[in-house]
Image (cartoon, grey):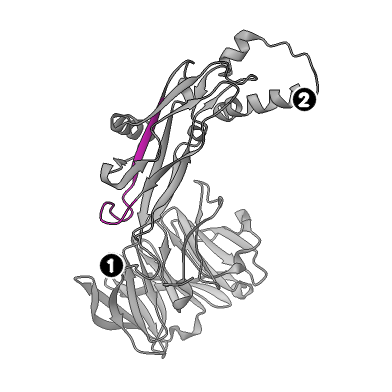
């Protein structure tokens, strides 16, 4: 907020000048607000984000210098913009990050020197030009600090450096994937991630089939349960529970080999929900009208109906919705992929779009850091997913 105030104060005072011919300026306060100093306006955003794709396209983001205060420059102010690799490590330490300096061969500054002429307040807006192909690795976080120096006026040190974050994603239709299982059309109804990289598939007959992965592909398979076609939703809840949801919620003990033990009913009347999603220590039910409600689910396998809370009113917009790390991922019927970050208490925050074209799949789930997606032919594909990038699956959107 402090930086935004420094940037907006000159604008506010200019508005006041339009209302009064006489303005008394407190010189000490003006100095504190950065009046009479030069700065980079884009430094108000830390970092300034530039998302690029690994295509032949050039990507641009702007920077310039501004003279703060209520007066235009009275004399020429010469400014310089310099990429500064030495600032990356201190930035990482301050923000607990792991950025690398943006490779010098991948970018250029359209202008490294300029002037704020008398009677003016700023330089033109120049471009950082990034050419990612052959230079950047996908989803690796890069940082480009650009520092301002000036002659003819002091520099506002708080806004002296803009930090440009660059993260490269694959181009549309060029996202790599690996086929890890072929079930055949109409044979795999439901995918359930299980322990140690194993996958449970409910087949068309309602049988649970347990698949074990070898070198990334699912090979060995054996049946571990029958009659599971009665459930609308099935999921594994660590460390040792399988949950099936129909009108009621049934919980089954299960060991890492897929052997079932005791079972009991832990909830009633859950047919009011279109879908049920496990997230951390909650079960989240989404009604047809979009109202999403979180039910605390404790380590003993009990639902706490006295402490439920509503999370959102529009989650019927998603055709697929599932937990991913400290967030939820949702896919809309137009194929857009969204991340819904969740705070420590399980409250959803502002969502962010992470991809497009995901409507090509019948089912999508998270397995560890990866996503598994099953198409209409029953083929299951693995994506080495990273939420820092953008995932456009189709060549034309």
The residue shown at (57%, 19%) is 73
The residue shown at (41%, 72%) is 395
The answer to whether the residue labelled 1 contacts the one labelled 2, judged by CB atoms less than 8 Å apart, is no
Taking depth in this image into account, of 241 and 138 the one nearest to the observer is 138
Mark toward the start of the polypeptide (1 vs 2): 2
Q: CA distance from mark 1 to mark 2?
A: 67 Å
Q: What x and y, as percent, mark residue 152?
A: 47, 15
Q: Is residue 125 magenta?
A: no
Numbered label tally: 2
The residue shown at (30%, 42%) is 102
Taking depth in this image into account, of 388 and 37 the one nearest to the observer is 37
SS assignment for the magenta stretch, majority: loop
Taking depth in this image into account, of 207 and 346 the one nearest to the observer is 346
Q: Image height check: is 8 above or below 206?
A: above
Taking depth in this image into account, of 283 and 395 the one nearest to the observer is 395
Q: Is label 2 in a helix, a strand or a loop?
A: loop
Q: Quadrant of the N terminus?
A: top right
Q: Report the disc number at residue 18.
A: 2
Tell me: 81 left or right of 271: left
Which residue of the protein is positioned furthest toward the left in this rendering? Answer: 215
Start-end of magenta stretch = 131-148
Tell me: 272 left or right of 201: right
Q: Image height check: is 45 above or below 368?
A: above
Q: Report the disc number at residue 197.
A: 1
Residue 124 visible (yes or no): yes
Residue 242 visible (yes or no): no
């Amino acid at each position: 907020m402090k930086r935004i105030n420094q940037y907006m104060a000159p604008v506010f005072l200019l508005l006041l000048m339009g209302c009064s011919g006489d303005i008394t300026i407190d010189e000490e306060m003006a100095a504190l607000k950065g009046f009479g100093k030069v700065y980079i306006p884009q430094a108000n955003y830390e970092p300034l984000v530039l998302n690029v794709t690994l295509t032949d396209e050039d990507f641009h983001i702007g920077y310039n210098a501004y003279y703060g205060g209520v007066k235009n420059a009275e004399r020429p102010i010469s400014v310089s913009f310099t990429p500064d690799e030495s600032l990356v490590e201190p930035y990482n330490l301050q923000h607990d990050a792991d950025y690398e300096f943006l490779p010098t061969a991948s970018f250029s500054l359209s202008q490294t020197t300029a002037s704020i002429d008398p009677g003016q307040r700023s330089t033109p807006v120049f471009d950082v030009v990034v050419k990612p192909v052959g230079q950047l690795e996908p989803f690796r976080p890069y940082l480009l600090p650009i520092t301002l120096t000036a002659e003819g006026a002091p520099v506002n040190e708080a806004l002296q450096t803009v930090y440009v974050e660059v993260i490269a994603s694959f181009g549309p239709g060029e996202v790599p994937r690996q086929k890890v299982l072929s079930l055949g059309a109409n044979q795999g109804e439901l995918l359930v991630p299980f322990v140690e990289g194993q996958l449970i598939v409910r087949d068309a007959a309602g049988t649970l089939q347990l698949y074990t992965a070898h070198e990334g592909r699912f090979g060995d398979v054996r049946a571990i349960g029958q009659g599971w076609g009665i459930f609308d939703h099935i999921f594994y809840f660590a460390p040792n529970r399988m949950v099936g949801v129909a009108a009621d919620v049934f919980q089954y003990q299960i060991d890492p080999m897929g052997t079932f033990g005791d079972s009991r009913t832990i909830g009633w009347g859950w047919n009011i929900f279109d879908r049920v999603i496990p997230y951390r220590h909650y079960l989240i039910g989404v009604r047809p009208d979009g109202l999403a409600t979180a039910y605390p689910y404790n380590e003993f396998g009990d639902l706490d109906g006295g402490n439920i809370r509503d999370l959102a009113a529009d989650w019927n917009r998603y055709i697929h919705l599932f937990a991913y790390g400290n967030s939820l991922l949702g896919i809309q019927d137009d194929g857009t992929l969204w991340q819904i970050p969740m705070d420590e208490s399980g409250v959803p925050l502002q969502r962010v779009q992470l991809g497009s074209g995901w409507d090509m799949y019948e089912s999508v789930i998270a397995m560890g850091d990866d996503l598994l997606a099953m198409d209409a032919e029953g083929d299951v594909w693995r994506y080495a997913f990273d939420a820092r990038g953008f995932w456009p699956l189709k060549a034309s959107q």
